Every structure is written in C-alpha cells, then in structure tokens.
Amino acid sequence: MMKIAAGGLVVLAALFGSGIANADSDREKEACQLMDDPAGAEMGYAPAEYAYMMLRAKMSAESARNAMSLGAQDYCPNHITDLPAGWR
C-alpha cells in the first residue's frame, strides 16, 4: 500500500511540477523579450526598468525580479549587466 501511495505522489509531482516549470520559463522568456523591446528605449527607460515596470503590472515585485534574474541567466545573458547588482 505504501508503494502505491508513493508512486501516486511521484506521478502528481511530475504532472504539476512540469506546469510550474513551464510557467516560470515563459515568464523568464517574457522578461528577456521585454528587455529587448525597443519601445522601452523609445520611452526613455533602461532595459531592466522597462521590463520590471511591465512585469510588475501583472505579478508581484518578487516574481518580476525572479523572472528577470533567472531569465537573464538562462535566456539572455547579454542583459545580466542591465540588472541591479543584487539581482545578478
């Protein structure tokens, strides 16, 4: 009985865990796209400022920071220097 319960937990973790990772990945990619968006520069914002402002409109400050930090590490390392030092 214990093996069945443990197996069920593994299956549930695999199903729900992959959705969370994918959502985070999508947010990280969005953060990179926003840092590359020329609209930010046209409005006078630095890449990280613009991305943070746009992400912050739809998520918490911590989530926006994490998306930008992890996104820069995983998808757009050219923007690492655009981030505040504590976010790198």
Image: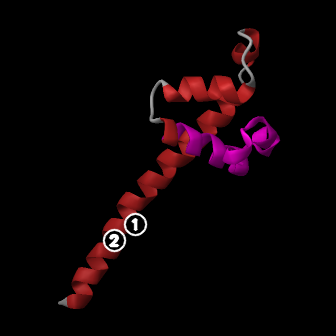
Residue 76 x %, y %? 75, 42
User: In which quarter of the view is residue 59 placed?
Assistant: top left
Circle 1 residues within 10 Å: few <14, some 14–19, many ≥20: few
Instruction: Give percent across and percent down for residue 57.
Output: 48, 24
Q: Residues within 10 Å of mark 2 (few under 14, many from 20)?
A: few
Label 2 sits on residue: 11
What is the distance, in whole Å, between disc 1 and disc 2 at their CAs? 5 Å
Looking at the rendering, in which quadrant would you find the N terminus? bottom left
Task: Say if the magenta span includes residue 54.
Answer: no
- Horizontally, residue 19 falls left or right of residue 39, namely left
* Segment colored magenta: 63-88
User: Residue visible at 54% across and 40% down?
Assistant: 27
- Relative placement, left or right, of 68 versus 10 is right
Q: Circle 1 is placed at which residue position?
A: 14
Magenta region, mostly helix, strand or loop?
helix
Considering only vertical position in the picture, is 44 above or below 62?
above
Residue that appears at 42% across and 52% down? 19
Horizontal side of residue 82 vs 30, given as left or right:
right
Residue at position x 41%, y 60% in the image: 17
Residue 13 left/right relative to 55: left
For badge 2, the amino acid type reads Val
**Which quadrant of the view contains residue 60?**
top left
- Check the image and report above or below for 24 versus 49: below
Q: Position of residue 73 (x, y in %)?
A: 71, 50
Q: Residue 34 appears in which quarter of the rendering?
A: top right
Task: Answer whether labels 1 and 2 touch (C-beta < 8 Å).
Answer: yes
